[in-house]
Image (cartoon, rainbow, N blue to C red):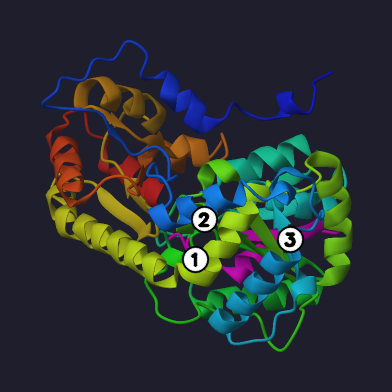
Amino acid sequence: MSSRTETTFAPPVMEARRWLEGAVFPPDRPLLNVSQAAPVDPPPAPLRAAMAEALDDPATHLYGPVLGLPDLRAELARSWARHYGGPVDAAEIAITAGCNQAFAAVIAALCTEGDEVILPTPWYFNHKMWLDMAGVTAVPLATGPDLVPDADAAAALVTPRTRAIALVTPNNPGGVEYPAGTLRAFRDLAARHGLRLIVDETYRDFDSRTGAPHDLRGNGPDPHLVQLYSFSKAYRLTGHRVGAVIADPGLLAEVEKFLDTVAICAPQLGQRAALWGLRHLDQWVAGERAEILDRRAAIEENMPRLAERGWRLMGLGAYFAYLEHPFAEPSDALARRLVHEAGILALPGTMFMPADDPAGARQVRIAFANVDRAAIADLFARLAGFDAALASPLATRGASN
């Protein structure tokens, strides 16, 4: 009999790091690590100063309310309402130890063993891992060449055991920004079947669109909508683990039970940093967004040199570019070769797909949060210069469908 953890795969980012063992990168060709989306730079200096000051407050070192600091919940509610143009109450906010915990808490509140959650593919692997460990079946929803899921296709997958549909937009791994109409169609599907639509908006702050990316908030709590958020990317607080659930208070009462038994409360220092960021860092975050959008533009500018070699850009946005490669070799083997032959650490599409879906073998994710324009040009030059046996045209067409 397997344990819960044995029902799922090893953490993909940690597995990829093991590929570096024994690799040597000359000074004139250093490793380009595009495997992980977490920013590696520390928070901005004013935020670090505010965190240092918070360390002198004895309350920073104590347990806090399970659903989060009241001031942070209220401030995020105001920020969410401004962004989406609809009322949000602090009672609809729960603060979690990162967005992964937010997802885990919501699934624990909604599902029991044998239930089902629909996940578009390519999927965010940590969502799949948690569903495996919770005894919940992840039902894959294939997306088309544009990586945008279709609500009508999802409707055909709904069964009496379906409890939720989980979307990530801007998407990880695909980078795609889901159209507002797509999200509305999924919300309506959830309402018709009495389901929850979980929308993970970890990368919301780097959406290329101005204003609210959708109109799901409406005029108050929606019993069919759950939004997830992360402060990690916006304020570079990855090590401090601060995320959020935005949902109706009834669901949060169940979420509270999970949070109390797992971590009691999100780290107090991270919560205080997030609160300071919400109050003081809007302009700084706007600058971070502008930098990410410029890197996105750099990828678009460099893509023709890869297209000439048979690569195809499937999705681009937030921190990610999702590519289809032209080689006969499957992406999991190809990714290992790229480390040693091109000095590139990237994740293969097989890490984001069901094991029986051949499309993953033709796909690669590039996370560009930590590579600037010059490094992006170098990355594309290395990929364009990489040589391997090409896939047959028939195999290429099959993987794209």
Asked where in the image residue 78 lies, by quadrant, the reply is bottom right
Image x and y of residue 40, in percent: 39, 41
**Which label's residue is closer to the chain start, 1 or 3?**
3
The residue under label 1 is which amino acid type? Arg
Asked where in the image residue 118 lies, by quadrant, the reply is bottom right
Q: Is residue 123 in sight in this rendering?
A: no
- Point 63% across, 70% down: residue: 76
Helix, strand or loop at mark 1: helix
- The quadrant of the image that shows the N terminus is top right
Mark number displayed over residue 204: 1
Q: Is residue 307 in sight in this rendering?
A: yes
Q: Is residue 172 above or below residue 386?
A: below
In whole angstroms, how far apart are the C-alphas of marks 1 and 3? 22 Å
Q: Does the magenta stretch include residue 299?
A: no
- The quadrant of the image that shows the C terminus is bottom left
- Point 43% across, 62% down: residue: 176
**Magenta-tinted stretch:** 147-170
Mark number displayed over residue 50: 2
Helix, strand or loop at mark 2: helix
The residue under label 3 is which amino acid type? Leu
Image x and y of residue 178, in percent: 49, 69
The residue under label 2 is which amino acid type? Ala
Q: Do residues under tags 1 and 3 come within 8 Å of each other at their CB atoms? A: no
Camera-near label (1 vs 3) is 3
Image x and y of residue 292, in percent: 32, 59
Q: In this view, does 246 lie above or below 265?
A: below
Mark 3 crowdedness (10 Å alpha carbons): few <14, some 14-19, many ≥20: some
Mark number displayed over residue 69: 3
Q: Is residue 176 above or below residue 22?
A: below
In whole angstroms, how far apart are the C-alphas of marks 2 and 1? 24 Å
